[in-house]
Amino acid sequence: MAYQNLISEIKENILYITINREKALNALNKDTLTELADVIAFANKTEQVRGVILTGAGEKAFVAGADIKEFSGYNGEQGEDLAKRGQDLVFNAIENSSKPFIAAINGFALGGGLELAMACHMRIASDNAKLGLPEVTLGLIPGYGGTQRLTQLVGKGKAIEMITTATMVTASDAEKIGLVNDVVPQADLISKAEEILNVIKQRAPLAISAAIKSVIAAVNNGDGYLTEIKEFGKCFETADFKEGVTAFVEKRKANFTGK
């Protein structure tokens, strides 16, 4: 897959996506968001992809924010459309993906960058990373789901504090408040994400998708229990369920096929 602002490749069933605008600290402009929407759709429909690692080029930034120059002259209607399109095509598309997405946060994750990381199912941060939502310093609020996902991850009080003060937090503090799963040296960032996905790859793919869907329903749809019940029932119709039970009885490793 050839993109102008992204590098993407599949290795051992993991799709690696690197936002490749290092000189701009990997800021999200329209073209980058369009390419992200395309590669996310590709990940969802491609059986070869079992998980996704999303990171930024270089050692300074995951994504330092959105490209402010592009929307500095927008009116209210244009601003609302910007937020809706971004949420629908990129941020919500990641969160609602059936494939696990891990954000490998290799530096600054600010504004739209932190929103992108929070849309992923898991977040690993390098020990030099700094995270924050500084939109109020521009007279704005987060528009790509940041007010919602930050609240889900760290709670109402801490979310309001971070958003209204526009204060950045360090990687270690982000781990303490539940904003990231793990903090590692930058040299170990991708290998840590790979370690997690390599464990997930050993599990039943359809069950993984069902689990992600059920967890997301718990925070977004208000019908998490019902979603869990339905997805639990669907699992009984899969060949992977039969293989998993047979392998358990026979005391061998299951060979899941995603069917």
Image (cartoon, rainbow, N blue to C red):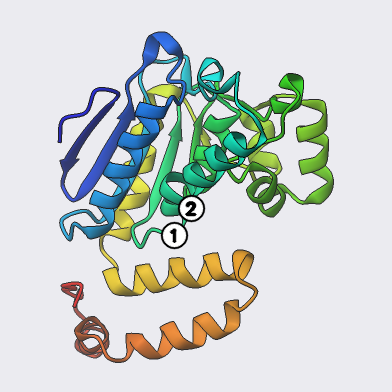
**Percent x, y for residue 170?**
66, 25
Which residue position is annotated with label 2?
92
The residue tagged 1 is 96
- Residue 95 relative to residue 11: left or right: right
Q: Residues within 10 Å of mark 1 (few under 14, many from 20)?
A: some
Question: Within 10 Å of the Cα at label 2, are there few (<14), some (14-19), or many (20+) other Cα atoms?
Answer: some
Vertical side of 128 occupied by 206: above or below? below
Looking at numbered disc 1 in the image, what kind of residue is underneath it?
Asn
Asked if the residue at tag 2 contacts the one at tag 1, i.e. Cβ–Cβ closer than 8 Å, the answer is: yes
User: Which disc, if any, is residue 28?
Assistant: none
- Is 244 situated above or below 36? below
Q: Is residue 182 visible?
A: no
Q: Position of residue 17 (x, y in %)?
A: 30, 35
Q: Position of residue 173 (x, y in %)?
A: 69, 33
**Front residue of this view, candidates 253 and 13:** 13
Residue 29 falls in image quadrant: top left
Q: Quadrant of the C terminus?
A: bottom left
Disc 1 from disc 2: Cα separation: 6 Å
Answer with left or right where residue 165 lies relative to residue 211: right
Point 54% across, 15% down: residue: 69
Give the amino acid type for the residue marked by disc 2 in the picture.
Asn
Please tell me which residue is depicted at 42% across the width and 53% down the height of the picture.
93
Callout 2: SS: helix
Q: Residue, x 68% and y 54% (percent of image)?
A: 152
Q: Nearer the viewer, residue 226 or 124?
A: 226
Q: Secondary structure at mark 1?
A: loop
